[in-house]
């Protein structure tokens, strides 16, 4: 009878207790949390690196696009010459209410407005929104 008893004892010693299972689950949960934290940290670092790269690219592009007033005047004159061939003229101005740049395409013969960018409706809407926003938020410092 001693033999079966020893088998029972070794079989009992193989079964993990509920405390051991709980400890294993806690260790696994901790490892999972650490893995998630590492992944999140790596993703955040990559995102920050991309943001820095994008900012540098935007700054570089804006420097390349920036034109001197003389260059802008030359381009405007070239546009005027081109439009003159199509019996149209261009007018560049700044809208006093909205502060936006406006381009008007005029019929050269009659002086009639053919097209305006942005349209009067858009300029009026921008002006009204600006007034409403100004009354809601005081922008003076």
Image (cartoon, rainbow, N blue to C red):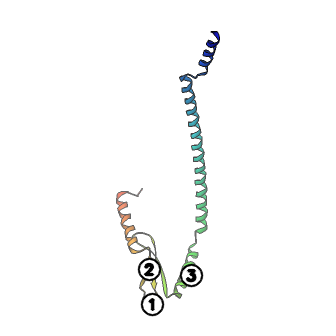
Instruction: Say what secondary structure mark 1 lies in.
Output: loop
- Identify residue for label 2: 115
Q: Name which residue lies at 56% across and 75% down.
A: 72
Location of residue 6 with respect to 54 vertically, above or below: above
Location of residue 134 with respect to 109 vertically, above or below: above
Give the class, few, some or many, for how many residues have Cα within 10 Å of label 1's Cα (few <14, many ≥20).
few
Q: How far apart are marks 1 and 2 (CA)?
A: 15 Å
Quadrant, the N terminus: top right
Coordinates of residue 30 in the picture (x, y in percent): 56, 33
Q: Distance between the residues labelled 3 and 1?
A: 20 Å
Q: Name which residue lies at 60% across and 49% down.
A: 46
Q: Which residue lies furthest to the right in this view?
A: 3
Location of residue 68 with respect to 5 vertically, above or below: below
Coordinates of residue 127 in the picture (x, y in percent): 38, 68
- Identify residue for label 3: 78
Quadrant, the C terminus: bottom left
Instruction: Say what secondary structure mark 2 lies in.
Output: strand
Left or right of 6, for residue 106: left
Comes first in the chain, label 3 or label 2? 3
Q: Which of marks 1 and 2 is in front?
A: 2
**Is residue 18 or residue 55 the one in the foreground?**
18
Comes first in the chain, label 1 or label 2? 1
| Image mark for residue 109 | 1
């Amino acid at each position: 009878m001693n033999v079966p008893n020893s088998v029972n004892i070794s079989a009992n010693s193989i079964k993990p207790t509920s405390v051991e299972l709980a400890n294993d689950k806690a260790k696994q949960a901790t490892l999972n949390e650490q893995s998630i934290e590492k992944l999140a940290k790596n993703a955040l670092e990559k995102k920050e690196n991309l943001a820095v790269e994008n900012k540098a690219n935007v700054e570089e592009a804006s420097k390349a696009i920036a034109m001197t007033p003389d260059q802008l005047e030359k381009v405007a004159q070239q546009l005027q010459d081109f439009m003159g061939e199509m019996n149209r003229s261009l007018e560049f101005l700044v809208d006093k209410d909205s502060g936006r740049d406006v381009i008007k395409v005029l019929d050269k013969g009659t002086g009639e407005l053919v097209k305006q960018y942005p349209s009067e409706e858009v300029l009026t809407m921008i002006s009204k929104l600006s007034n409403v926003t100004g009354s809601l938020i005081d922008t003076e410092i």
